[in-house]
Amino acid sequence: MELYELTEREKTVLRYVIHQFVLTANPVGSRNISKKYNIGYSPATIRNVMSDLEDSGLLGQPHTSAGRIPTDRGYRFYVDSLMDPPKLTKKVQKFVEVNIDPIKSETDELIKITSQILSEITNQIACVTYPKFENSILEKIQIVQLSSNRILVVVAIKSGLVRTITLELTTSIEFKNLQHVQNILNDRLSGLQFSEIKETFAARLQDLNKEKLKPIIRVFVDSIDKIFSDNRLEDKAIISGTKNILKQPEFEEFENIQGIIELVEDKDVIIHFMEKKSSEHPGEISITIGKENIDEKLSDYSMILRDYKIGEATGTVGVIGPKRMQYSKVLASVMYVTEALTKQLRA
């Protein structure tokens, strides 16, 4: 991106224009800055600085007689150079710990709770993607007989996560045959990555010719993607907080309400962007603003993302909101919630 060399005076004015705009959602005038913030400059001086910042593309003026608002470039400079260090209050930290800590249930439920908590403390839309299991390592498989032709496959991953999948067979099966297949699968597949299992499963079991085992092996072959990939999830992420974000002044107009609702309903746009950013910058904090998001549907929003990792499985925690957001607080929230989620998944 372009680099801007700003004077200390320009940095100060830009910082407080953004602070005031985030606070009020109204264009900011020089007299407003002079009265509210004791920065030692007259309204006339501030007005001249704001004009220079507009010429630099860091501020914009929606109407001739109105004050200024930050542009995407202005927000970017602020995030990179001017915002306060990310920090959460003890009260918010406690809220996160109390609500996440007792949850020791399935991964799916923990993802859902995490998304709801993040939306609650930021008043934005929160999105948490499920862990991607492609590089996960299989620890063991357990097969539980539910009926004469239905089985529950419990897949334990080295990281400690567990996945469960229900499969139906075309013929009745005996318990002793299930146990036999379970032992064979664990003997031949334990310690392998999911991606390797998917590619070589049929070859590793092609020597099993016992008629009584074939129906069980066949259902595993037919369901290999369902068992050892992310396709078992109808959705790849949990998105929460539409009601929270609609409280923001940006959504007083029907057109803007319609836009955010359509975005949430078409969650593939959000998930695709999160996965793309995760693959480009694994393990890093990502803050994208406005048109940096590339997709036109995201151009009015900012996104703050961070990966979480459980063993070899990875997912992403993120917040989506208007560009007029409290970046420091939202960044701190994403970081803290991601760490809390990781801790609970490892517990």
Image (cartoon, rainbow, N blue to C red):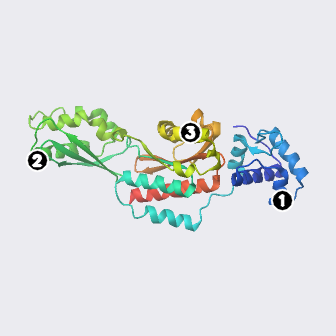
Quadrant position of the C terminus in the picture: bottom left
Q: Residues within 10 Å of mark 2 (few under 14, many from 20)?
A: few
Q: Amino acid at mark 2?
A: Phe
Q: Determine whether, in the image, residue 192 is placed left or right of residue 258.
A: left
Q: Identify the residue position indicated by label 1 in the image.
A: 35
Q: Do tag 1 and tag 2 residues touch (Cβ < 8 Å)? A: no
Q: Please report the residue visible at 56 percent of the width from the left and 67 percent of the height from the top.
A: 91
User: Which label was assigned to residue 75?
Assistant: none
**Disc 1 from disc 2: Cα separation:** 79 Å
Task: Residue 38 in the image: state x and y as whole percent.
Answer: 83, 61
- Of pointers 1 and 2, the one earlier in the residue sequence: 1
Task: Residue 32 in the image: state x and y as whole percent.
Answer: 82, 54
Q: Determine whether, in the image, residue 262 is placed left or right of residue 248.
A: left
Which quadrant holds residue 207? top left
Does the image show residue 306? no
- The one of 122 and 315 positioned closer to us in this rendering: 122
Q: Identify the residue position indicated by label 2 in the image.
A: 175
Residue 218 sits above or below residue 45 on the image: above
